[in-house]
Image: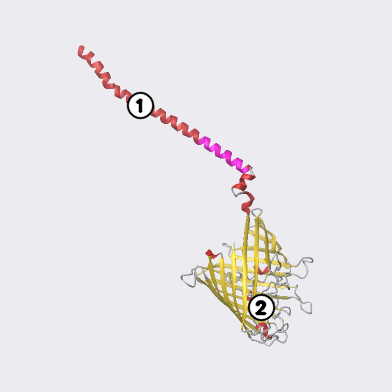
Amino acid sequence: MRRILACGPLCAVLLLPVVARADATALREEIQILREKVEALESQQATLLGQDIEEYLAADPAWRGAEGGGEHDRITIHASILGVNQNTVGLDPSNRSVVNGDYDLEFDFQVTDNLSMFLHMTGQGTDSAGSDGSFPSQFPPGGTPGAPAGQATLSGLFDGIGVNGTTPVAPGAANMYEAGIRFSCRAGELTLHHEVGELDPRTRFLQNDIADDAETQFLNDLFCNPPAVEWLTDASGRTSYAYYGWLELGANKQFTVSYGWFNTPGRWFDHGQFYLQGAWKGEVGGRVMNVRVLAWVQDFFRDASGDGSAGGGASWDWWLNDKVGVWVRIAVNGGEVNPVQGDYSFGAAWNGPFGSRPDDQAGIAIGIIQANEDVLIGAPETTEVTLEIYYKLMLEGGKLQVTPSLMFVSDPGGGIPPWQDDVLFILGVRFYVPF
């Protein structure tokens, strides 16, 4: 009996650690449960606080402006500065060097998902006569000392632009170049796109990915805007009001049909110009190819009998690989309105022609202009041939583009007096800064 009583305290001592461990385990479990409840409450409070902050910022336009949201992110602004120097060679003693420049400022506003508007402004410096200073308005007649300037090449005879494609179609210190609205709507399975406003047809028809922009590609307007087309816009600054529309067809939207009516303000439905173009964009050999075919009828420019004219053209471009692209463009017209009956041009461009200059670009193009003998009566020659070579230096990551160029024109102006030389050389350099 005494041994049993003696074992009692001993057993109690031995069981104390077991009981203590059981209590500690229970305590840790309670602590873990409390910690999880606290974390759940904190997460719920953070969620509610975040929702309150978002609702406040969404309701307060001042906060939306501070974070860069709201209507400000629906506005896009582009700006650029351009300068061009051109110098005749071999017209002694009548050689001249001219400089012209301009700026562009473009505002685009995304009003809704289907509606936008745009305001594109341009401005140029002018001389005492109101000219922007570019050729051909200041061409000296070859080999005729003291004779007045004014002789043009065939590429600039109709629209007054020619060898410097940057000559503005909206001349002046600060003018509106284009302004309008763009709207898209559904018609069954198709989406119709519309533009209405002051529009330039030159940027909407016979486009070409390699020869379409005199500010960054070939400078001569022959290679940007075919002179056989009687464009409504020209160096006179004529205002062009228009309706322009297009729709995309095909499973991959590779086909585009575009059309437009262009005229001056006033009796807009009378004696205007209508353009219709079909285009295809696809891949050949893994590279993008574009084909565009244009037809137009115009009654704005009329001959002595009061008749207008009609014509057609085509444009093709294809990048053979990452470095080399080729292109062709033609345009012809009928009637006795335009002194140019047809033009045919082709060329190529090279990206990174030198390994040490991978962002630079070089280009070469040849254009043949056929004169309309019923309009250009008495021209000694019926064709004018133009060759242009350029090399574009891409500096500051492409934000400064410096482009030396050489042009050669054979039988300029069809050789009509006062042209006395049958060749014209022009050396030039173009400076362009886009933003």
Amino acid type at image mark 1: Ala
Which quadrant is the C terminus positioned in? bottom right
Amino acid type at image mark 2: Ser
At 63% across and 45% down in the image, what residue appears?
Answer: 62
> Along the horizontal axis of the image, is 311 left or right of 250?
right
Q: Quadrant of residue 411?
A: bottom right
> Along the horizontal axis of the image, is 353 left or right of 301?
left
Instruction: Tell me where residue 39 appears, x and y as whole percent.
Output: 47, 34
Decide whether residue 221 is among the magenta residues: no
Q: Which mark is residue 155?
A: 2
Q: Which mark is residue 136?
A: none
Q: Is residue 70 above or below residue 11?
A: below
Instruction: Tell me where residue 127 appears, x and y as whole percent.
Output: 70, 72
Instruction: Find the magenta span and give its range.
Output: 43-58
Q: Is residue 11 above or below residue 156?
A: above
Residue furthest to the top: 1
Front-most of 208 and 125?
125
Marks 1/2: CA–CA distance: 98 Å
Which quadrant is the N terminus positioned in? top left
Q: Which mark is residue 24?
A: 1
Colouring scheme applied when the structure was drawn: secondary structure
Q: Quadrant of residue 86?
A: bottom right
Instruction: Tell me where residue 110 appears, x and y as whole percent.
Output: 64, 55
Q: Is residue 409 above or below residue 102?
A: below
At 56% across and 68% down in the image, what residue appears?
Answer: 401
Q: Is residue 422 above or below residue 311?
A: below
Mark 1 falls on what kind of element? helix
- N-terminal of the pair, mark 1 or mark 2, is 1
Q: Quadrant of residue 341?
A: bottom right
Front-most of 431 and 104?
431
Count of numbered badges drawn on the protein: 2
